[in-house]
Image: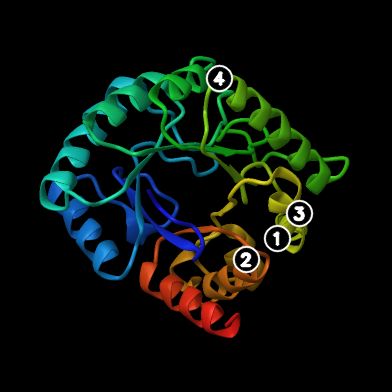
Amino acid sequence: MLSLATPAVMGIINVTTDSFYEGNRMHELHQVMEKAKQHLEEGAAILDLGAQSTRPGAEMVGPEEEMHRLIPAIHAILNKYPAAIISVDTWYAAVAEKAVHAGAAIINDVSAGDMDAAMIPVVGTLQVPYIAMHMQGKPATMQQNPQYEDVVADVLDYLKEKLAACRAAGIKDFIADPGFGFGKTIDHNYALLKNLRLFYDILGVPVLTGISRKSMIYKLLNITPAEALNGTTVLNTIALQQGTHILRVHDVKAAVEAVRIMEKMNG
């Protein structure tokens, strides 16, 4: 129901106070609703709700707490904005199932089924689009000396295997996410970005890019996440040039403007 002929912008809503970016920490429902309103007014095609921080070293939240945070937010958003497309950022199959029954339309799994073996079969049963992301290790330890033989080839091979497993489980709509910042050094991240077009060319599925305000920007430039909007826009523009289909961002307005300018450039 969502065309990706023009790249779509996914607005991040973290239903938690434990986010690496201070500007997107929220846990009160009114804060979630204000952010949803802002994202939609600025042109977000998808709202990505997550109740678990995946910053390096973050404390893991269980499925019951995730549901406690997410389900009321999904109900409230869809009650006010019934046409909104909601993606739920979770690695728990039980949360995915509850969220879809509550009205969520997409599952966004940073572990691509590795954290919960039931996830891929459950998503196949639910018949919703599935975003599978590559992550080396787990959030608590993923940035402790990540190593690859060839980061582009290794991540591509991993996502190829996940695509095959998802197709076997009956998942029709698979979206690939190389996992910028998830078990990668700055050099790994830039190698992936430089070769991002290969992911669509080889996998033949839509590609999501999530680089908003991440350390590949602020550590390189010796600034804070709060100061990383300009760098984010530069990298989002590069990702668009590399053919990405979805930009996952904290700042929807800037990303939508980048998409409009690139679309004009491309005729």
Q: Mark 3 points at which residue?
A: 198
Kindly identify the residue that appears in the image at 25 percent across and 51 percent down: 84
Occupied quadrant, residue 194: bottom right
What mark, if any, has residue 193 been given in the picture?
1
The answer to whether residue 140 is above or below residue 248 is: above
Comes first in the chain, label 4 or label 3: 4
What's the residue type where badge 4 is placed? Ala
Q: How far apart in space, not on screen, are marks 3 and 2 (Cα)? A: 12 Å
Q: In this view, does 34 lie to the left or right of 234?
A: left
Q: How far from the left and from the top, in percent, is residue 59?
A: 44, 32
Comes first in the chain, label 4 or label 1: 4
**Are discs 2 and 1 less than 8 Å apart at CB?**
yes
**Are discs 4 and 1 less than 8 Å apart at CB?**
no
Asked if residue 207 shows in the view, the reply is yes
What's the residue type where badge 3 is placed? Leu
Label 3 environment density (alpha carbons within 10 Å; few <14, some 14–19, many ≥20):
some
Tell me the element at label 4: loop
Q: In this view, does 115 lie to the left or right of 158?
A: left
What's the residue type where badge 2 is placed? Ala
Q: Name the residue under label 4.
A: 169
